[in-house]
Image (spheres, helix red, strand yellow):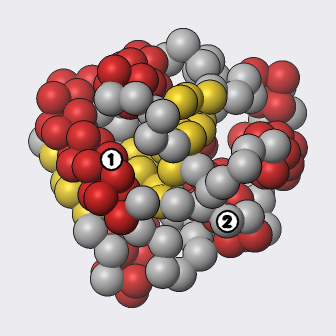
Amino acid sequence: MRGQIILSHGSDSSPDATKISALAAVAESLGWRTQRPDYRADDTRGLAGSVASRIARLRATIESLGSPPLLVGSSMGAFVSGLASVDAPVAGLLLLATPSEIPGYARSFDLRPGVPTMLIHGWRDEVCPLAGVQAFAARRRLPLLVLDDNHRLTDSMEAITVQFRWMLAQMAVAA
């Protein structure tokens, strides 16, 4: 076994979401163990109301593991993955369609400095404007792959998979 990966779905989605399922399948085919927390009960609290309970659920999952996991998240899943990394040890972050803020939630997007991170976003993201994550990536000097796609990034799964495989290979070498 290579390591642990926790994949977090977006708001109003599920652990069986297209991107999360596809990335879990790639990781598992390469010998990684995956977990996909189910945040649907948290999401009934609304966008801002779900953040704290999502972070608590994700941190509990991280703490149940024997070693720091790679966190993969899409949209709200990316937002909470970044915030969870501030307080819990993680091996890396792959964040898709990341919002820079959640309206009504006090904290802006953040992550633990020094954690290997890759951000992927769509030029035509109609839900999470590119400018917010672009400014965050620029401040932190983080890699940001911007693809000709919308918020769902469904037309970019091949490019996302290539980046994910590269990240997993880098983590395997570092281990």
Secondary structure, mark 2, is loop
Picture quadrant of residue 58: top right
Q: CA distance from mark 1 to mark 2?
A: 17 Å
Q: Residue at x 41, y 68 (%)?
A: 116
Residue 145 vs residue 37: left or right? Answer: left
Q: Amino acid at mark 1?
A: Leu
Picture quadrant of residue 65: top right
Q: How many marks?
A: 2
- In this rendering, is residue 47 above or below 132? above
Task: Looking at the picture, tell me which residue is in the foreground, 61 or 136.
Answer: 61
Q: Residue at x 63, y 56 (%)?
A: 68
Quickly name the residue at label 2: 89
Res. 165 visible in picture: yes
Residue 104: image location, x then y, percent: 76, 57
Task: Looking at the picture, tell me which residue is in the foreground, 64 or 133.
Answer: 64
The disc label shown at residue 168, or none: 1
Residue 111 vs residue 167: left or right? Answer: right
Residue 97: image location, x then y, percent: 40, 46
Label 2 crowd bin: few (<14), some (14–19), many (20+), radius 10 Å: some
Residue 157 vs residue 78: left or right? Answer: left
Residue 70: image location, x then y, percent: 51, 50
Secondary structure, mark 1, is helix
Q: Residue at x 29, y 42 (%)?
A: 164
Residue 138 vs residue 96: left or right? Answer: left
